[in-house]
Amino acid sequence: MRSSDKELLLDLLVMQSTQAISDEENKELQKLIKVYPEYNNYEFDEITSLAHMSYHLDDNRSHEVLPNELKSKILNSHKQIDSLSLYKIKINEFMRSLFDQPTYAWAITVLLAIGISFSMIEFKNYDSNFRYLPLERVLLQSTSNDLVEYPWYSKQSDFAMAKGDIIWSNKSQKGFIKISGMPVNDPLKNQYQIWIIDPLKYKQPVDGGVFNINATDQDIIIPINPKLPILNAKAFAITLEQPGGVVVSSQELILTAPELRPSSTFTL
Amino acid sequence: MASLAINQSNYLSKSMTGSKKTKKLEDSILFSLAKEEAGAFEKLVDQYGNLIWSIARRYLSNQTEAEDAVQEVFIAIWKSAGRFDPNKASEITFVSMIARRRLIDHVRKIYRHKKLEPIDDCFDDDALQTKSILDQSTDVKIISEAINQFAEEDKELLSLSIYQGYSHSEISKLMNIPLGTVKTKLRRNLIKLREIFNQDQHSIVSINNA
């Protein structure tokens, strides 16, 4: 490798510590880090953080006070995520103890199958912003080491005000959409549908569930509900479909994430 | 996206090679947080809330985005608390690294660069608490003194890039210097800063061990 490659690596590491880098730059960076394993992605994070603190110390105008309302939100988030994690641990322990007893196992399996069927029907038309959705989203962000995150890009002028992002973890098979500025829909006439593009596994995009928008001026969080197991989600899209959604869409794309479609032979 | 915390130990052991701090882990808020002590998270927010909010407001002018990002930062710090090692970095450095990493990632999702709006003067007693935390940090002082020794153009470059969040191409236009020069100077200045910092850490250890 040429010394200019090492310089390029250092330049990209500096950029990574100081600004948002593009997907192409990140790809190049990861390629070079494999060649120079003595470097890692966070090479300059410590020194740039210290330099930032040093400038911050000297800049009296930038010393803001955390708003009390935000402080309360942060403390409540922590309490609820902590309780949710503890709740999940307890449920898992309880379920394990039940399945250890064969006489209960078959009964639990049947009940779960019935329960899951009902919840899948319900989820098709769930209300956004279930109480725990924002916390579940934060939990997924904080605990996943394979998280992909993309902002939404509008493909139609009617949806130009739409803003938000999508996060997804292949390992957890979970993801969330956060969105605002979408036009309100009439659920009796149409519903928004999420699509997951997984080119290695499926020729067609996978149905990620339908949702309604009942307000345009606030962030709405929607869990992604894939109908099939996802191997490696490469992109996401939203269309407007008939109530209940469709198996294969023939509608125009409203939003995509990322902006450019991965190369594929898909019809969507 | 890989969490900062996963590679934290690799990163810190490389950049702080040979240096030792004598701080006790047990004195840190992060240690209490990792042990799930009651009230530890609240102490974390009390100690670093103003600082992290101030950093977030520099990166994100939209109040809602900044609030979301700050919540994510605190949850990320909570989840990473068990990886904190005071022999490798100070608590404030650890906290600010996670905060900046999360905020840069957040900006990457939203847009490339935000125009920094002037912030109203609110240098009150609560804001003084942030100043005092930073004042007490030996690490920050070392870097501050090192930056002050740089030539004016280099100081300006570092400020525009690290503190004001301009991209390399934006700095090239602002300062009217070639893009290649911006990249080279920033790279060299940061490497130099890191060398100075590591040397000073060695000196502190020598004095402490004398």
Image (cartoon, helix red, strand yellow):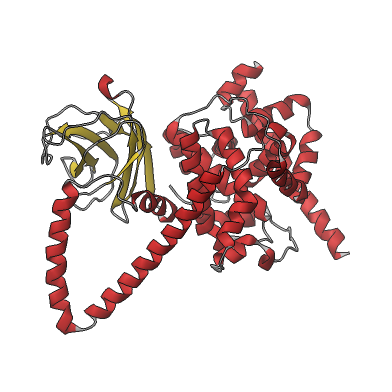
Along the horizontal axis of the image, is B87 left or right of B107?
right
**Whether residue A242 is visible:** yes
Along the horizontal axis of the image, is A97 left or right of B115?
left
Along the horizontal axis of the image, is A56 left or right of A205?
right
Please tell me whether residue A223 is drawn above or below residue A97 in the rendered image: above
Q: Quadrant of residue A246?
A: top left
Write the residue at 59% across / 33% down.
B58
Quarter holding the C terminus of chain B is bottom right
Along the horizontal axis of the image, is A121 left or right of B64?
left
Q: Position of residue A50 (x, y in %)?
A: 68, 44
Please tell me whether residue B39 is drawn above or below residue A105 in the rendered image: above
Question: In the image shown, does A115 or B203 lie closer to the viewer?
Answer: A115
Q: Position of residue B137 (x, y in %)?
A: 75, 50
Q: Quadrant of residue A237?
A: top left
Q: Position of residue A252 (x, y in %)?
A: 18, 26
Write the residue at 56% across / 55% down.
B8
